[in-house]
Structures are given as structure tokens and as C-alpha cells.
């Protein structure tokens, strides 16, 4: 059994204090540096647009800055919204970023779940899956071949010279986020590492399905990660404090702010996103959030591991209106008092 690894997931949300963006970004870079020193395996940043949920919509800019300030932690998007990119431009940026970080790039890919964000870019939501799948095919071809030839529904590329090559061969690791059987099956059939979201029981079932499909074998022509073993991970919002009371007080306010940020574009369009909850207690019971004292979150995490059986646990430490000091204290408690015990399980 492989050693359990830990990572960080980040939306880089706008803070309720209304502080300057440069302060927010510097605070986040300081957290990534601390994670690098503590032995965290990876840092993954989401992509969202036109919403307070993301103040770093151009992930590559933040990741390039992080690359210059770290040496070991792996860095990457979770995920690039492929329908919003021309694939050959993204290929060039991926190659550049992989070299800037010394071969530490991990590439998350997806189609996007917000119809409003896609619509602002002129991409119909009903077209997004087809665009995503074709763009992924083009990107893999471009990373692996000196010339790119592709004729599809959305892209016609005739012998495009690929002068830039990634540092990792044949390409950096590819990841996919999923919360249902179709997503788990797609990831497994395409050799993608996977990160599951949602309630623990469902995640455990999807993890088993993913591993079952992977075990049947993969058509090498479809395999996005021929260079490594498959990884199945989970994402959870996380906050630990010196007492359960302190953790819940800070956590409840932060969760409400996070909920408001996720709902902003939906509520602006008079739609309620029923897949989400504004109640921290409900989120904890569902396994979406882990909040409490050191002992409480240690027990919660152990239960998550028992039910979901992941290879990789990705935790969001800075979310909602949480201050940088609260997020950093939570991370330090996790890194010093919780992670060492769980890694040795």
C-alpha cells in the first residue's frame, strides 16, 4: 500500500475585509511556502471567473509565482476549464510552467460546472463536454509530438510545430474532478488521476468503481498518465483550532461566506444551487467539511479514510472569510499534530 499523501486545495476567495488583492496573494504564497517546508505533496488551485470565489482566475500566474518560492511541493490547477482555452496556447503555457517549477507541474482538467461563467465566454453549457474532451485529446497530442495534427469538430490543426516540450515525459500528471459514476468511469478509462467530491459514502463507492475500471486495463491511446500509478483522492474543507468551540465559531462564519461566494453567480440569476448547503453542521455530517479541535478532526479524518480509502487527501485551509492568521494556525496544527500520525497509518 502506498504512503498516504496530503495536498492543499484553494479557491483564493475574496476576503470580507476588502483588503487589497496583492495582500491576499502574498498571504497565499506564504501559506504555499509553509506547505512546501512541511512536506505537503501538492498545491491545487481552482479556476473560476467573474465571482468572489476566485481572485486568481489565471492560475498559471499564481503557480509561476509559487514555483519561484518553493522547491518540493507539486503545483497545478484543479482544474483548467478546457472549453475556455485554445488548446495550443495552453500547451505552450503548460510546457513553460513545467520548466519554471522544475518538473513539479500537475494538470487538472475539466469542463466547468457553472453555466454562467461559460456563457460569459460564449461557450454554451451543452457544448462544454464535447469541447472538453476534444481539447484534452489535442493537448495530449501536442505535449507528446513534435508536430500537431488534428481534425475535429472544434479544432482543425494542420502540422503545427510544437517547439516547446514539457520537462516531464511524456507529459505532467493529469487529474480529473468527479462526483458521480460517469466521472469516475471517464477518469479510469482515460488513465486520469481522480479527486472525488461529495459525501463520504458516495466517495467510497466511486473510489471502488474507479479502481475496478482501472484494473480492467486501459487502451494506451487513451492513457493520459502512462508514466505512473493511478491516484484516487478526496477534497475536504478543513479547519482546526485549539478547541471545538473556537473552531465552530470561526468555521460557521467562514462557511457562510464560502457558501455566499459559491452561490453568487447563481443567486444573481435568481437560481438556487441545490447541491450545496449553507449549514456547517450539515456539511460536517455529510463529510464535506472537517472542523473541530485537534482530537476531533483527527477522529473525523480517520473516519473519512476508513470510508473513502483514498491515496491522497486534499484539504482547503483558507476559505470564506477566514483570516490568513486563522488559516495559517489551522495549517500549522495539522502539519505538526495530525499529518504525521495519519501518514504512518
Image (cartoon, rainbow, N blue to C red):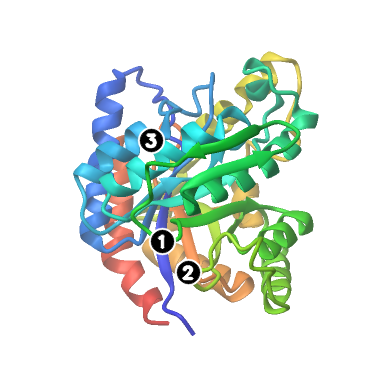
Q: What number is the disc on residue 60?
A: 3
Label 1's element? loop
Toward the front, the furthest residue is 159
- Badge 1 density bin: few <14, some 14–19, many ≥20, Cα 10 Å: some
Q: Earlier in the sequence, mark 1 or mark 3?
A: 3
- Badge 3 density bin: few <14, some 14–19, many ≥20, Cα 10 Å: many
Residue 89 vs residue 336: left or right? right
State the separation of the CA atoms marked 2 and 1. Answer: 8 Å
Q: Which one is nearer the viewer's eye here, 202 or 277?
A: 202
Label 3's element? helix
Q: Earlier in the sequence, mark 3 or mark 2?
A: 3
Point 66% across, 24% down: residue:
118
Of the residues tagged 3 and 2, which is closer to the observer? 2
Check the picture and name the quadrant holding the C terminus: bottom left
Label 1 close to label 3 by CB (< 8 Å): no
The quarter holding residue 110 reads top right
Q: Which one is nearer the viewer's eye here, 311 or 63?
A: 63
- Label count reads 3
Query: How far from the left and from the top, in percent, is residue 202?
Result: 72, 62
Q: Is residue 242 above or below residue 230?
A: above
Q: Which residue is mark 1?
A: 169
Label 2 close to label 1 by CB (< 8 Å): yes
Point 43% across, 56% down: residue:
172
State the separation of the CA atoms marked 3 and 2. Answer: 23 Å
Q: Which residue is mark 2?
A: 227
Q: Which one is nearer the viewer's eye here, 43 or 103?
A: 103
State the separation of the CA atoms marked 1 and 3. Answer: 20 Å
Label 3 close to label 2 by CB (< 8 Å): no
Query: How far from the left and from the top, in percent, is residue 138?
Result: 60, 43
State whether residue 9 appears in this view: yes
Q: Earlier in the sequence, mark 2 or mark 1?
A: 1
Amino acid at each position: 500500500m502506498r504512503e498516504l499523501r496530503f495536498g492543499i486545495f484553494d479557491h483564493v476567495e475574496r476576503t470580507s475585509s476588502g483588503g487589497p488583492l496583492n495582500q491576499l496573494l502574498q498571504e497565499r504564497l506564504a501559506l504555499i511556502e509553509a506547505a512546501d517546508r512541511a512536506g505537503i505533496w501538492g498545491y491545487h488551485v481552482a479556476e473560476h471567473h467573474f465571482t468572489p470565489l476566485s481572485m486568481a482566475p489565471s492560475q498559471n500566474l499564481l503557480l509561476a509565482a509559487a514555483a519561484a518560492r518553493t522547491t518540493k511541493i507539486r503545483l497545478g490547477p484543479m482544474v483548467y476549464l478546457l472549453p475556455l482555452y485554445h488548446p495550443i496556447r495552453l500547451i505552450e503555457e503548460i510546457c513553460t510552467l513545467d520548466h519554471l517549477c522544475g518538473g513539479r507541474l500537475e494538470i487538472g482538467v475539466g469542463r466547468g460546472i457553472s453555466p454562467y461563467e461559460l456563457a460569459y465566454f460564449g461557450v454554451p453549457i451543452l457544448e462544454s463536454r464535447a469541447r472538453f474532451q476534444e481539447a484534452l485529446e489535442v493537448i495530449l497530442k501536442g505535449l507528446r509530438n513534435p508536430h500537431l495534427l488534428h481534425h475535429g469538430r472544434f479544432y482543425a490543426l494542420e502540422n503545427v510545430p510544437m517547439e516547446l516540450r514539457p520537462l516531464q515525459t511524456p507529459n505532467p500528471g493529469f487529474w480529473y474532478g468527479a462526483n458521480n459514476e460517469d466521472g469516475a468511469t471517464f477518469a479510469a478509462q482515460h488513465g486520469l488521476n481522480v479527486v472525488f467530491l461529495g459525501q463520504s459514502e458516495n466517495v467510497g463507492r466511486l473510489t471502488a468503481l474507479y479502481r475496478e475500471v482501472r484494473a480492467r486495463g486501459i487502451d494506451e491511446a487513451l492513457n493520459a498518465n502512462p508514466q505512473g500509478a493511478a491516484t484516487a483522492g478526496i477534497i475536504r474543507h478543513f479547519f482546526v483550532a485549539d478547541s471545538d468551540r473556537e473552531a465552530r465559531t470561526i468555521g460557521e462564519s467562514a462557511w457562510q461566506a464560502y457558501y455566499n461566494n459559491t452561490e453568487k453567480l447563481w443567486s444573481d440569476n435568481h437560481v438556487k444551487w441545490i447541491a450545496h448547503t449553507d449549514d456547517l453542521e450539515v456539511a460536517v455530517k455529510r463529510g464535506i467539511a472537517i472542523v473541530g479541535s485537534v482530537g476531533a478532526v483527527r477522529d473525523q479524518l480517520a473516519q473519512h479514510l476508513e470510508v473513502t480509502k483514498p491515496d491522497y487527501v486534499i484539504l482547503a485551509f483558507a476559505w470564506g472569510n477566514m483570516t490568513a492568521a486563522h488559516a495559517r494556525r489551522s495549517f500549522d496544527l495539522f502539519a505538526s499534530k495530525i499529518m504525521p500520525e495519519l501518514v504512518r497509518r
